[in-house]
Each structure stands twice: as C-alpha cells, then as structure tokens.
Image (tube, coloured by chain):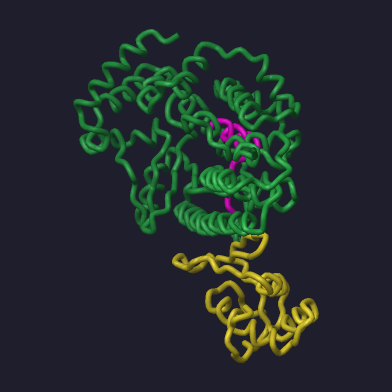
Chain colours: A green, B yellow
Amino acid sequence: MTTAVQIAAHGLPAAPALVNAPLERGSWHALLQESSHQRVTGHLVRALADGSVPATDEQWREACDEHRTALALDLVLDRLLVSTSLVLREAGIAHRALKGAALAYTVYPEPELRSYGDIDVLVEGARYDDAIEVLHADGGRARFPEPRPGFTRRFGKGVCVVTHDQLEIDVHRTFVAGPFGLALDIEDLFAPPTHVHIGGTEIPALAPVPRFLHACFHAVLGDRLPRLVPLRDVAQIMLTTDLDVDAVLECATRWRARAVVQHAVLTTWRVLQLDAQHPLLAFAHTFTPDRFERTALRSYVASDRSYATQAAAGVLALHGTRARAAYARALLLPQRDYARARGGYLARLRRSARLARHWKQPA
Amino acid sequence: VNEAPSRPLVDGTHFVHAAVVVRRAPDAVLVLPLDDRAAEPIMLSGTGVAMWEAFARPSSPRAVAATLAREFSTDQDDVARAIAPVVAQLLAAGALTEAP
C-alpha cells in the first residue's frame, strides 16, 4: 500500500518504489487525507501524473482539488511574506525568510512541490522588539507574552504574531528554544543572503549552509514526531543541491550542533526509507556527540521532553554567571501575564522544582 | 471561461503584472495579486490556463483570442467573447496590467 511517507520521498534519488495498481477506496482516502495533513499534495499529484501511483479519474480529481487548496494557501502566505519583509525593510530591520517559501523557491524545482502553513522570519536580536512593534502596528498581535520584558531579544526563540486574518508569522530570534538555539552563532545567520524573488520583490533568505542547518533543526527539534515535509527538505537539499559538506560540518561544529545534523540525517533516511549515499550520511553513521550535545539533544527528543525541559537545558549553552542568572530568573519568576498563559505561578513552581532536580547533574 | 456571458473585449495591450504570485496545478493556474492584501486567489482552468500563459508577453485580448482559437480549433469570436470578462476581472484585480 502506498503511504504518505512514500509520497513525501517521491522524486528523490533512491526513493522507495510505489505500488502499481490503483488503491481501493478506503486506502486512497487515507492516503489523500494524510498527504493533505502532511502538506505533500504536490508530491502526490506528481506521483499520480507520472504514473508512479496509478489512479482512477475520480482519485485524480480529488488529489487535484486538495492540491489546489494547498496552493491557494501558499499564495496567500507568499503575499504575507512579501508584505512582512517590506515592513521590516522599511523599518531598517535586518531579516531572513526561513523554510516555507524560502525553500520552495530555491531548493525545489517548482514551488508547487513545497507547501506550507505559516511564514517564518528571522530578525536580528538587537532590533527584535522593534520588529514586533512594527508588526503590531501593521495589524498583528503576539500570541503569548514574554516571560519577562526583553527575554526573547536576549534568550528566546521568538514569538508567533497572528495577523488580523488569522495567519501566523513566526518571528524568530534564533532557530529553536533551548540549548541548541542559544549555542548557535546568530551572526552566521545574517551572512550575505540568498535572495528569493516573489512577485517582483526580493526577499532575503538564509545562505545555503545555515539554510541546510535550519532544515536539520526544524526536522528533528520541532515536533515530537518528525513531520514529513521538514524531512523531505533535508533530503531535498542533500540530494539535489550542491551542498558544501565541509562548510556545513565546520559551522555545525562551531554551533555545537553536529548531533542535530547527525540525528536529522539518520531520521530522514530511516523515515523516508532512502537508499542513497551521501558524505553527510557517512558522517552521521560514525560521529559521536560530546556531552553537551547528548544532553542538549535529549531535551528535545526524549519521550518526556517539553518546552520547560528545553528551557532548563538552555542554561548549559549560556556563558557567564550573569547570563545564566538572568535566564533562570526570567523562567522561574516570569511576569504575571506569561505565567497566567501557562497555568499560573503554582503550576510553574511545581514544574521548576521537578526540572531543578532533573537537571541538577546533567549527563 | 466557457460559461462567460457575452461582453465587449477590453481594448489595449496587457501583460501579467510583476507583483503577482502564481501556482500551477495540473488542471488550473492560481493567481494572486500582491497589491491588494484582502484579495482571494483567482483560479483559471481550461482555456483560462492558456489565456494566462499568453499574457506572459504583452498582448491584446484580440491577439490572445486568435491564438487560443488556433490552438483549440474553434471560432475566434466565440473565444473573444469568452475571455472578455475574465480579462476584465484580471485587470480589475491587478493581475494583468496595461502595457505602456
């Protein structure tokens, strides 16, 4: 039976083979629903069009309907990305588009193969609060308050800004919350950009090396169960672009994130059932993470992981007593609005006590 | 496009506006002008796809109708009547623009 996993890998070198007969009704609708949920309808339609997955006329029409719906959202999000970039540019705030359109237009042969559900923009930490302010002035509102004023600008991953029409702009200061987001070198992210042209507007996006590293972060440090599109992004970049592997490993070493690359590559090959060779796959099979990387990775991928465990592990990535104290104080004694949005002070104190015990002696 | 009511052709030469984003599905083209932040994507299907592609270069609706009539082996006036309201809609939405 064809699965959404096989669809997500369709078109890659050494992707798994697909079935050679039309699916019966129940299996087809399960595949269609999962492909839509995983935002891989572009690959599904491609697999149907090139005959890799035989389909009835009705199945073809249903797949096209789902795909058009996904494409319509992509267009609306492209427009939001353009307007957001122009607002930030007008305010003189350096920024980079992340994933979504930034990948669809650069590493895929056609943007129709890479759908998305929101937009992600990285902004410079020094102007982070200004960025949120101009997006508020443009009609957006932050979904959650900060633990303490200025926390995100200094330590946080970022915030989600919701527009008046309920679209989401993830405004990042760094790639992820917690230790790996704190350990990476933000200056690398603002290296000369790759430019993406959308509707006549030039949008700055990450350069190829941080773009690939972000794909790795997104693939395995985000959702508890890795989603298929981020895994496809990792494979797509590795197998279809001229990725500078030495530069990737040099940067990952400085960011103390080689374990993230290792975990992303191995997870991508395992989940998408790929059978292709690549120098980063060879690296992933032999690399042994250091103590920091093992401890940090565990806070993202362990079965009992949570935002709180990642935040607590973030202390390990900070340098200096003052920075650690400010970070811990903000998380243990947040402002009232932040605590209320997350269950109140008592619940936070109980979680903090548990985490303090857990992280007292990191492995 | 096939069900469009009869209407005079919009005069002038038009082409696809630079501030437009496009996605191509196997059976349709979806178009969204960027200048109007409230606009919904416009879907063109059937001969509307060929019409959209024809406006990639500055063309008059009459020239596009002639091209489509040849391509689909049909009457040029019928095609002209069919595309007129669509061209008008695309111009009003800002997806097509007047050539200088």
| Residue A211 shown in magenta | yes
Q: Is residue B93 above or below residue A143?
A: below
Viewer-nearest residue: B80 or A108: B80
Across and down, in percent, residue A360 comes to 35, 10
Give the residue drawn at x 43%, y 19%: A319
Quarter of the figure with residue A20: top right
Report the side of B74 relative to A40 (left or right).
Answer: right
Give the residue drawn at x 77%, y 77%: B72
The main secondary structure of the magenta stretch is helix
Residue A188 can be seen in this image: yes
Viewer-nearest residue: A246 or A363: A363
Quarter of the figure with residue B7: bottom right
Viewer-nearest residue: B46 or A359: B46
Q: Is residue A100 above or below residue A164?
A: above
Please count the marks in the image. 0
Residue A100 can be seen in this image: no
| Residue A334 shown in magenta | no
Across and down, in percent, residue A325 comes to 32, 20
Quarter containing the C terminus of chain A = top left
Report the side of A316 relative to B68 (left or right).
Answer: left
Q: Is residue A108 above or below residue A62?
A: above
Across and down, in percent, residue A92 comes to 47, 51
Q: Please, which residue is most extreme toward the bottom here?
A: B8
Across and down, in percent, residue B48 comes to 65, 73
Give the residue drawn at x 26%, y 38%: A341
Quarter of the figure with residue A240: top right
> Which stretch appears magenta?
A203-217
Quarter containing the N terminus of chain A = top right
Report the side of A72 relative to B57 (left or right).
Answer: left
Report the side of B95 relative to A362 (left or right).
Answer: right
